[in-house]
Image (cartoon, rainbow, N blue to C red):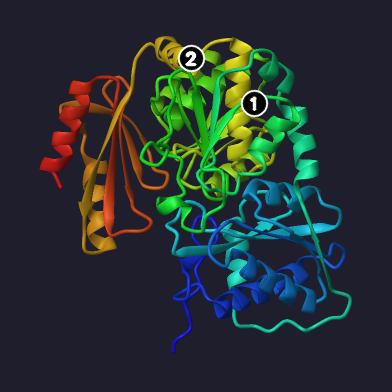
């Protein structure tokens, strides 16, 4: 039987349990990480290991810890299911830490599991780091004495850090109506626990860990956030709690794009400064708000590892992606759904307005409402995809709209007409598809661009 080909995606290695993701595969990855770390430092020797609620995640985590102990490392193994952002925080701030291992497949379906290495800057491993780790695949590190495993909970220092970032007193004083939809994810026992600690009232549902995530996907999207109640804001996280999702008081899903625009305005009003760092797929509404405040924007490819890299280089007021990943410069350079939910609650409480009111206000502040759509084109190979992208990139006019600007990051993004309409063309990372992401401040313009794409693909 051939060995699984190990590749690192935007955030670690993922595969179907018992097919690509096996104890053999995990051992090969851990050996490579051990060799990478050993060559990196002779001083720091502690590795944090955590895991999400997925099938056999605890067993895989314990297996990783046993291997690392055999290679002479001190392993701090979480004694329970733990969110990725807490493990990332510990990777940076735990004494003598050189990094962390997290067993998670994030928002993937239940049959998947994954493993990621988190360097001790507390963000996703860069491509340079994962490429270096891959060089050691199928190498065997020397066993060493002195290794040990310590099992403990990891949230105490993380909670203290959040308490320095979030105004819990204001949330408590202006107590919004809150529902925490646990969605069977790793944020259960953490998000609710910190609300309890500060005597903030909330209703809750789906509050137990489930390896099949209640039969749905571990993703905080409208399809899976089914519990709504008039007058309540509903907050949820994905499987490993690094993404967030929110419904307003009327049960409407507020997209991460609108949330980012609202939070950018809120943070600016609180005197926060720095760059707005965003992935290429983020809505133009964020650019409009940033421009009104004179905030510099930095655009990266899709994937929080690119945001993390820019966060480490620049003062950052806010960093985010349209898929629900978010952080700020004062926090770790890693997406954190628990922190995002708390910041949303602080904004609602501080402004003493409903989430719906704030969402309506941001559209008024931006001066327009943005509409989005997507066209997927199935292609046989990369040659076809690249050729089609090049054809669109060479067009001087699209749907009778002049191309005002062009951004070639992770595909091609074309800004049309008044600059408030755009067409992002990029390859899917998981399927043989070329995706056309369309956005406009006018629904008729959007339909015209959509028709043009369909007629020219």
Give x and y (percent) for residue 407: 39, 38
- Depth check: 148 or 452 in front? 148
Left or right: residue 182 versus residue 109 is right
Give x and y (percent) for residue 164: 78, 29
Callout in the foreground (1, 2): 2
- Depth check: 155 or 318 in front? 155
Q: Residues within 10 Å of mark 1 (few under 14, many from 20)?
A: some
Quarter the N terminus occupies: bottom left
- Depth check: 431 or 134 in front? 431
Q: Are marks 1 and 2 in contact (CB under 8 Å)?
A: no
Tag on residue 358? 2
Q: Mark 1 = which residue? A: 274
Residue at the image position 21 percent from the left and 55 percent from the top: 378
Q: CA distance from mark 1 to mark 2?
A: 22 Å
Residue 455: image quadrant is: top left
Can residue 286 be seen here? yes
Residue at the image position 57 percent from the left and 56 percent from the top: 53
Extreme-left residue of the structure: 455
Q: Secondary structure at mark 1?
A: loop
Residue 169: image quadrant is: top right
């Amino acid at each position: 039987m051939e060995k699984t080909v190990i590749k690192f995606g935007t955030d670690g290695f993922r595969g179907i349990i018992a097919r690509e993701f096996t104890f053999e595969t995990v051992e090969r990855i851990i050996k490579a990480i051990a060799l990478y770390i050993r060559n990196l430092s002779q001083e720091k020797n502690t590795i944090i290991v955590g895991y999400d609620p997925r099938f056999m995640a605890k067993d895989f985590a314990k297996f990783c810890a046993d291997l690392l102990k055999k290679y002479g490392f001190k392993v701090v193994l979480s004694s329970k299911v733990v969110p990725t952002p807490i493990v990332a925080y510990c990777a940076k701030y735990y004494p003598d830490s050189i990094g962390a291992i997290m067993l998670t497949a994030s928002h993937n379906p239940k049959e998947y599991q994954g493993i990621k290495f988190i360097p001790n800057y507390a963000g996703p491993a860069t491509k340079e780091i994962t490429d270096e780790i891959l060089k050691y695949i199928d190498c065997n590190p020397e066993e060493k004495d002195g290794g040990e495993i310590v099992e403990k909970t990891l949230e105490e220092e993380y909670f203290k850090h959040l308490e320095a970032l979030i105004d819990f007193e204001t949330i408590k004083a202006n107590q919004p109506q809150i529902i925490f939809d646990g969605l069977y994810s790793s944020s259960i026992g953490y998000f609710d626990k910190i609300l309890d600690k500060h005597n903030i009232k909330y209703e809750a549902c789906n509050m137990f860990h489930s390896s099949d995530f209640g039969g749905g996907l571990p993703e905080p999207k409208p399809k899976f956030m089914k519990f709504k109640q008039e007058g309540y804001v509903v907050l949820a996280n994905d499987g490993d709690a690094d993404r967030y999702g929110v419904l307003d008081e009327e049960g409407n899903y507020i997209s991460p794009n609108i949330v980012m625009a609202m939070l950018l305005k809120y943070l600016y009003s609180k005197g926060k400064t720095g760059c707005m760092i965003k992935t290429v797929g983020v809505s133009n509404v964020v650019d409009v708000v940033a421009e009104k405040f004179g905030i510099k924007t930095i655009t990266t490819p899709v994937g929080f590892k690119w945001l993390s890299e820019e966060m480490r280089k620049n003062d950052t007021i806010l960093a985010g992606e349209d898929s629900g990943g978010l952080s700020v410069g004062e926090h770790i350079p890693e997406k954190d759904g628990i922190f995002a939910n708390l910041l949303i609650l602080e904004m609602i409480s501080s402004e003493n307005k409903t989430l719906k009111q704030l969402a309506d206000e941001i559209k008024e502040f931006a001066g327009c409402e943005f509409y989005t759509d997507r066209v997927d084109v199935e292609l046989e190979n990369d040659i076809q995809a690249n050729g089609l992208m090049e054809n669109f990139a060479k067009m001087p006019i699209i749907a009778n709209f002049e191309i005002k600007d062009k951004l070639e990051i992770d595909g091609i993004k074309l800004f049309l007409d008044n600059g408030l309409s755009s067409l992002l063309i990029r390859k899917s990372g998981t399927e043989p598809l070329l995706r056309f992401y369309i956005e406009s401040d006018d629904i008729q313009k959007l339909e015209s661009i959509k028709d043009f794409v369909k007629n020219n693909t």
